Amino acid sequence: MRQSTSAVPKLWYRSLLESLLKVLTGDDIVEALKSFIDAIVNENVSLVISRQILTEVCTHLTQLDDNISKGVAHYTLDKVQPRVISFEEQVASIRQHLADIYEREQSWREAANVLVGIPLETGQ
């Protein structure tokens, strides 16, 4: 049984993400995840694949140390900003996660500011 053409890159990105998360720690994982984000939100990658893999990144962010997760989350929001309409669901998830981190830190203003950026009207 052959896999569809779009399944191959998706599986490759998923495998790469899981490998990065298993092998790396600390600053290495931050830099690796930033490079990974750069690759998946690139306009040369299918939007369908970008969304699916970014959704998986969002899921993994919740399992990382808060400082690492916060840095990667802010970086991701900056990278997708020019195409935010294409990634509304993922942006909302990342912003909610950041707000949770700020709430744990009792940084209420930062939590509120992050939540304000969630797109309420959908373009998808």
Image (tube, rainbow, N blue to C red):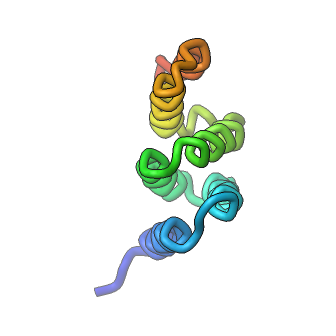
Q: Quadrant of residue 50?
A: bottom right
Residue furthest to the left: 1
**Residue placed most toward the observer, 106 or 63:** 106
Q: Quadrant of residue 2?
A: bottom left
Residue furthest to the bottom: 1
As drawn, is 20 to the left or to the right of 2?
right
Q: Which residue is pictured at 69% across the width and 58% down the height?
A: 27
As drawn, is 26 to the left or to the right of 50?
right
As drawn, is 42 to the left or to the right of 66?
right
Q: Which residue is pictured at 60% across the width and 43% down the height?
A: 67
**Residue placed most toward the observer, 14 or 106:** 106
Give the image location of residue 65, x and y in percent: 52, 48
Answer above or below: position of 90 versus 59.
above
Observer able to see residue 15: yes
Q: Quadrant of residue 43?
A: bottom right
Observer able to see residue 124: no
The quarter of the image holding the N terminus is bottom left
Give the image location of residue 117, x and y in percent: 58, 20
| Total marks in image | 0
Q: Which residue is pictured at 62% across the width and 61% down the height?
A: 29
Give the image location of residue 36, x and y in percent: 63, 61
Residue furthest to the front: 105
Q: Which residue is pictured at 48% across the width and 71% down the height?
A: 22
Answer above or below: position of 31 versus 91.
below
Give the image location of residue 62, x and y in percent: 44, 45
